[in-house]
């Protein structure tokens, strides 16, 4: 009986050290998928704007022409929000709420913003809308040098 108790204790210790690492890896994978989906939604939103002339009101408008599938919620279960440009600027922002403490890395550099809101973090990705003028300007600058 003492041997069985010792084995159960050892298995419990091993399980308690492995489990947090496993949950952390799952959350990190969900976070990376969320960031990739934010980026895809931002790009599809700019394509929608350039094609239709207005901003999408939700992600369901982006499929199937601008995205293969409409992605409405993140792997964490919260809904994606498309925030159209305000005041004539040409920057579209897509945001979502995720559990606090997961967004520690910044794989997208300055495009990704993390806003801490108590028990949740709001992550946002912004993308510049390239219209014909800005695309032409980039082309001309490349040819000058």
Image: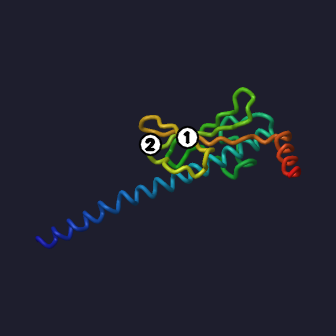
Left or right, 58 with reference to 131: left
Q: How is the image coloured?
A: rainbow
Mark 2: give few (<14), some (14-19) or many (20+) Cα within 10 Å: some
Residue found 82% across the figure and 46% down from its top = 138
**Residue 63 located left or right of residue 95:** right
Q: Which of 142/30 is in front?
A: 142
Measuring from the top left, give residue 4's x and y in whole percent: 16, 71
Q: CA distance from mark 1 to mark 2?
A: 12 Å
Q: Which residue is mark 1?
A: 96
Q: Which residue is mark 2?
A: 100
Q: Residue furthest bottom?
A: 3
Residue closer to the observer: 37 or 67: 37
Outermost residue to the left: 1
Please tell me whether mark 2 sits on a helix, a strand or a loop: loop
From the viewer's side, name the closer residue of 112 and 34.
Answer: 112
Give x and y (percent) for residue 67.
Answer: 70, 49
Which is more foreground, mark 1 or mark 2? 2
Please report the residue visible at 39 percent of the width from the left and 59 percent of the height from the top.
21
| Residue 7 position within the rendered picture, expressed as x and y whole percent measured from the top left | 20, 70
Residue 85 lies, in percent from the top left, at 70, 32
Describe the element under mark 1 as helix, strand or loop: strand
In the displayed structure, would residue 108 be above or below residue 121?
below
Outermost residue toward the front in this view: 145
* Mark 1 residue crowding within 10 angstroms, few (<14) / some (14–19) / many (20+): many
What residue sits 58% from the left and 49% below the top?
Answer: 35
């Amino acid at each position: 009986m003492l041997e069985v108790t010792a084995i159960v204790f050892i298995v419990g210790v091993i399980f308690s050290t492995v489990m947090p690492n496993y949950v952390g890896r799952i959350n990190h994978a969900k976070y990376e998928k969320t960031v990739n989906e934010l980026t895809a939604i931002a790009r599809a939103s700019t394509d929608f704007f350039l094609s239709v002339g207005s901003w999408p009101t939700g992600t369901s408008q982006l499929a199937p022409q601008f995205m293969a599938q409409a992605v409405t919620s993140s792997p964490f279960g919260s809904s994606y929000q498309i925030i159209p440009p305000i005041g004539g600027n040409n920057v579209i922002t897509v945001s979502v709420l995720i559990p606090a403490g997961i967004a520690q890395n910044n794989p997208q550099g300055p495009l990704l913003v993390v806003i801490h809101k108590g028990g949740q973090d709001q992550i946002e990705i912004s993308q510049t809308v390239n219209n014909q003028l800005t695309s032409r300007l980039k082309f001309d600058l490349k040819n000058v040098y």
